[in-house]
Image (cartoon, rainbow, N blue to C red):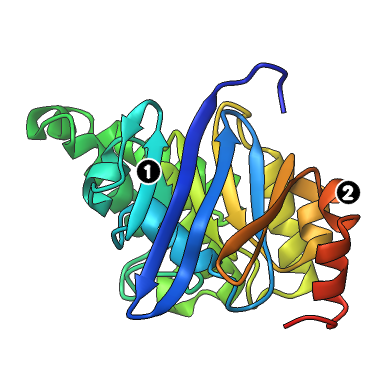
Amino acid sequence: MTSGSEALLEVRAVSKSYGGVHAVDSASFTVHAGTTHCVIGSNGAGKTTLFDVVSGATKASSGTIMFAGHDITRRGADHVSRLGLVRTYQSPRPIPAMTALANVELAAAGRAADYGLGKLLRHRSEVTERARRLLELCHLGAGSSIASALSHGARKRLEFAMALACEPRMLLLDEPTAGMNPEETDEMAAILGGLNRELTVAIIEHDLAFVRRIADRVTFMHRGRVLCDGTLSEVESDERVQRIYVGRED
């Protein structure tokens, strides 16, 4: 993390309850601009629910979420995305019957349409060229394959390219390596490592070896709460984290 970098995302005492169950319980942490920030913890810790709340997919029960100086606590996913906060999911969601290129073009065109239909029509060739560059960045070649015919790892990379096509200031990636083999995981790490450092990334991840390769800072969640926050070595050395990860505590 660059010294003095601005706080791009601030999660302040955010909770999300379903009936009497606190999926997220007064969680607070900050993601600084230009960093890669990983959120880790065991299954059921509240990580995905936290991303749901931050991205506007569901509303927080209490607390405040600030992004780039905007209060997005009560904003929906479309509004949050237009501000530049874009989210991917554990299961990739490209349109199966379309080519990889068409999927990325559609994502890029959707972003361009935010600036008006006239601009979109005038810059169709630029949309296609941007889509091709992103496919190359994500190791997807020319993008001529139908999305449904791609391997799981390639579909995950395609969704990542689609997210980048939205011109985000910050990406929320929910388990980007889930279901990948070691070679595909290495490929994703290389892609993330090659991103422009102006892009901020927050990632839910279980693979600590992968986290070790990419993370500037780590937040550890347990039972809906943020238990600790710091560098990965600081988090791993925390006695509470060690107890949880060696199975002494549920």
Q: Quadrant of residue 152?
A: bottom right
Q: Residue furthest left?
A: 118
Image location (x, y in percent) of residue 151: 57, 76
Name the residue that disc number 2 marks: 233
Q: The disc labelled 1 sits on which kind of residue?
A: Thr
Q: Judging from the image, what secondary structure is the residue with disc 1 in? A: strand
Q: The disc labelled 2 sits on which kind of residue?
A: Ser
The residue shown at (48%, 65%) is 24
Image location (x, y in percent) of residue 30: 57, 38
Which comes before the other along the chain, label 2 or label 1? 1
Mark sitting on residue 202: none
Regarding residue 105, the answer to whether it shows in the image is yes
Mark sitting on residue 64: 1
Image side of residue 121 versus residue 174, left or right = left
Q: Please name whichever residue, 103 or 247, is drawn nearer the observer in this view of the structure.
A: 247
Q: Please name whichever residue, 32 or 78, is drawn nearer the observer in this view of the structure.
A: 32
